[in-house]
Image (cartoon, coloured by chain):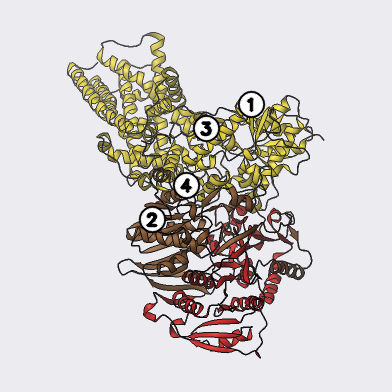
Amino acid sequence: MKIIVLIKQVPDTAQLSANMNGLQLMASGPRIINPWDEYAIEEGLKLREAHGGSVTLLCLGTPDAVETLKRGLAMGADEAVLISDPQLAGGDSLATARALAAAIEKIGAYDLVIAGRSSIDGGNFATAVQVAALLAAAQLSYVAAIKAIDPAAKTITVERLMEAGRETVSSKLPAVMTVVKEINEPRYPSFMQIRKAAKKDVPVWSVADLGLDAGQVGAAGSQVKWSQIDLPPTREAQVEILEGTAEESAKALVDRLLAEKII
Amino acid sequence: MSNNVFVWIEQNDPIAWETLGAARGVADQLGGQLVALVLGENVANLATEAIGYGADRALVADDATLGPYRLEPYAAIITQLAQAHQPAVLLMGASSAGLELSAYVAAKLGVGLAPDCTELTVEDGGLVATRPVLVGNLVAKIAFGDARPQMATIRRRVYPMPTADSSRSGETTGVAAVLSESDIPTKVEGVAASSGQVSLTDATIIVSGGRGVGGPEGFAPVQALADALGGALGASRVAVDSGWIPYAHQVGQTGKTVQPDLYIACGISGAIQHLAGMKTSKVIVAINKDPDAPIFKFARYGIVGDLFEVVPALTKEFKARLGT
Amino acid sequence: MLSLVEKILFVIAVGVSLYYTQVTFSKMITVVQRGQGQLNLDHLPPRLWTALRALVNQGGIIRHRPVTSLFHYFIAWGFIYYVLVNAVDVLEAFIPGFHIPGMLGNLYRLLADLLTVAVLIGMTYFLVRRFLVNSAVLTIRDNVTLHPKAAAGMRTDSLLVGGFIWGHVGFRFLGTAFLVALHGGDPWQPFASLLAAPLDGLPETAQLIGWHTSWWLAIGLILAFVPYFPYTKHAHLFVGPFNFMTRPPRRALGALDPINFEDESIEQFGATTLTDLSQTQLVDPFACIMCSRCQEVCPAYTTGKPLSPSALEINKRYHIWDQMAALAGGEADESPLLEWAISPSAVWACTTCGACLDVCPVGNKPMFDIMDIRRSQVLMASEFPAELKGAFTGLERNGNPWQMTDDRLAWTKPLDFAVPTVEENPDFEVLFWVGCAGAFDPGAQEIARATATVLHAAGVNFAVLGNDETCTGDTARRAGNEYLFYEMALGNIETLNAVGADQKKIVASCPHCLHTIGTEYADYGGHYTVLHHTQLISELIGAGRLKLNGSNQLEKVAFHDPCYLGRHNGVYDAPRLTLAQAGATLLEMDRNRSDSFCCGAGGAQMWKEEEHGSAAVNETRFAEGRATGADVLAVGCPFCARMMTDANTNAGSPMVVQDVAQLVAAALQK
């Protein structure tokens, strides 16, 4: 099986603290591999282990995103490609998907593209789906389990985690699949693999390499942009104790949770 | 280009009406019509309902290929309708289906998409969306480019359910399916309801029990609250070690690390072993008899009291308010 | 006197024996040399002294199983003496009229006579213990991986060795009795004389034949047995002392060896197969006598986990016997240790408490084998309990295993004095290393506050690193993630040296930090004087800098020795002294000081679920503390505090678990 895994480098939201707010984190905080993407890589590796083939990682990002690819290589991926070009900056999900789809086509024939459900920075739930739309491949989102896969017959059956429950869907391959965390437990790279990964070459593809015009990608190729970014209203650090009888405190809590649109 | 606002009406999910309610405001500000896109099999009633909830008219695709929701046939119709009718805005609910469908359609149309929005306003004749990013640690305003329709999905329960008005009437126009069954790569084999077994790592709401639940039977009210919220059931290490609940439910350093929007800790003192697994939850609610329990230091809301009184009261209140 | 024919035969027999001894011993040596590194043979005189001490005191066996140990001393000292006895016997048989003259000879014979009987009594005791009583301490539970040949082999081996000793010494005894009978009595050999009495009536020829036969059997058994030594556990009698002699020097009992990560030619990290172990670890199975003392003190084994340190050594032994020719012939041994030596669950059940290292009378190092296997599992195979991933990720990204992002100084907020950082107080005399637990765990924060309060009250000029502090890497190291430890160690050494901590004192309230910084960082160029907070506090009390309400006899307190303070670093008195001065009446648990029993958190157990067994380690230890009748269980480690507090809560007991510093802080005169 030829598997391509889309990964992204994101700010590590676990580093948010009294000493680092969201803006500071976005600007200069430590970067990690998007947590869901580790599950995507793991699923790719498991499929390769079961059915043979190869796993290629594809990441669009700044040059230092190569660290994220190295992490994925250390987990066991065969190859990695970084799409990096100043022209890509400021791209919305579709502009990003265009570059990714072009890169996938450059890589050539594939059976399955796997990505995380969403990223912890943009949280668009969109890029991988849009890659599927651009590639005209079948799209399987929120996959919690692969029930069956037959690379020879080019079919796959998955379980999708939806609000109504677990939906079993069969599909033709090639397909694009996004995964949720239930699907597996990502492996921790061994030192041996980290060392091997460090020596691997990661080619960097520019917009021109992908055969795209500057107007199709990055801010120039985008139809939405973040025009303003703010910190959410600060809250009292102290806990608010809800007093009263059980019924009163329950009502007070539900009031607050609904008012804050938490549920 | 029209000033009309199109809304996809998802079947069997109240998010469709919340979205329609939000879209009503947008359509009014743009001075356009609010058009419901109703797709499915035997969905004539749904079109009527949509008009009752505020749509001016409905475009209805009723076809066997549209029985259960599937991305490709739905996207094909919506894409074609958008190209044919040139709406100014196309909205959907930010449900699992709405998120992927909107993304797919936006890609096919080559237009901008603001997913999972908490606020929609109209400025200078165009949509401006507000949405939380960086898992809720930043709020971004989304500005759209020139392409139309401007697309957005609306976060669940942000906009209120509009009141249904059965006296409203509107035109219902049938449209044909675009893809035939042989053109559709996927097939839905079945759906298993997953109530009570929502996976912890993917849950947006988690209700957990600890030492305070006192025994296996003590998890019943905790489970009931989780069910009422459509959330997952968690537990502290003590509860698991005591054999009250299986290890799969354990949240903490040596269990699952979770990051839900809402974490309700019932009878959990908040040992570091537990905190390590859930402290990054967006909102933590602590219910504990002991006002000095460390969990209160990490919680946004706390209720000092007997969980066997508070939790059932909460379940009742949530059910009443959420209609679950 | 032997006849000429006998003498010739004897010389031939010696030649044959020596030849085969050389063959089998060479094999043993070659097998050992298949291991990594070298045996330590530098500084030979002190090493020989170590060996001699181990030989004479038998590795200090008397500390445990006193009765059995006493019988073992009988056999061991008897056997040591028998080296002389055998030599004299041979000389007497070869040289006409040879004997040790005068009173010296009398004493020699008396001692030989007494020790002969002592050996026979001792050996009888051991045979009865193993074969009639079937002592439980000599059996290994079913859930432990055991080599297929081990169960039967252990009994056969014991019977062989027992039979050999009984035969050799017994026939020598009989031969002596014949001699005594021939010579008409010897008051210096009372037991031989007793045995000679019924032989007195025999004709002289019969007595002579009796002596010749006995002599040949006694000496013959030696000649026959010596080449066979490497194949029996009896080899322990010299491999044991040899093992002590050739062990690598360690700054602390369980200080782990570094790995060179800069050398890219290294392709194997930790131990996957037998020959990945170091040479000294391959001496271990030859030294093992299968007494299972290590198993008896192992917190994992005694709480039902599938880990027995002795089974590990026994499995190595039987594996080597099976493969001796192949191993000695240089063939690759591909079979993973995890398939035959020890189960994965056992590997992850080890708390690294070091009790097995401390107790072993022949200097075996099963804990190091387990750590080497963990290293290979993590660094090579990436197979380890999934729960540890959280701790590893926390160390990588947040510098603490809980993935906490809070301010590392948050614990100081409730104090009514300021705790200065090194920036605020660059001229500090003592660096207080708070540790991750002290910084983040609400329970351990109390300990950190108490420690700071005491230092403040004594007017100690101290400072903390604040947010520049990170985990020492102990968690990663004990969990086999040596690479992560290496990175953290280098980072911390840089931080510590930058503030001049290498020129000052460091005080730690966590023994794991103390051990790692104080003894293990030295391998990476970090040399520090690290004191446990109880050591510093006891110094302060001694210097009169702390005024305690010591006259109030407060409470009955039992102190639980933390493994990494006590056994690993030898600090036993400071906490007790401190407690006494704080007015506590000290009680001791059955297992205390170097015999202390782990709380269950060490060896990275804190960061994973306990392996499946029959009891929880912490509850087992807590029950022991409770049995003392003390009001307070005093601890000196935040992880012990956590484990004992949890056990206390589970037990619903009225006991109080507190760190020594907390008790001292409470006893401070206001």
Give the chain letter at badge 1: C
Disc nearer the start of the sequence (1/4): 4
Q: Relative to C557, say whether B15 is above or below.
A: below
- In x, y percent, where is residue C397? 55, 46
| Tags 4 and 3 on a common chain | yes
Q: Residue furthest right?
A: C670
> Along the horizontal axis of the image, is B302 left or right of B205?
right
| Comparing labels 1 and 4, the label whose residue is closer to the camera | 1
Residues beneath discs 2 and 4 located on the same chain: no
Mark sitting on residue A56: 2
**C203 or B261, which lies in front?**
B261
Residue on which disc 3 sits: C520
Q: Are marks 3 and 2 in contact (CB under 8 Å)?
A: no
Q: Which mark is residue C395?
A: none
Q: Is residue C370 visible?
A: yes
What color was chain B assigned in the picture?
red
The chain letter of the brown chain reads: A
Q: In terms of secondary structure, where does tag 4 sit?
A: loop
Instruction: Using the numbered discs, state the Cα–Cα distance from disc 3 to disc 2 in whole angstroms.
Output: 41 Å
Chain under label 4? C
- Residue C504, numbered circle: 1
Residue at image position (75%, 71%) is A247
Q: How many angstroms separate mark 1 from mark 4 (CA)?
A: 37 Å
Q: CA distance from mark 1 to mark 3?
A: 18 Å
Tell which circle, 1 or 3, labels the residue nearer the N-terminal end: 1
- What residue is shown with label 4? C348
Chain ID at mark 2? A
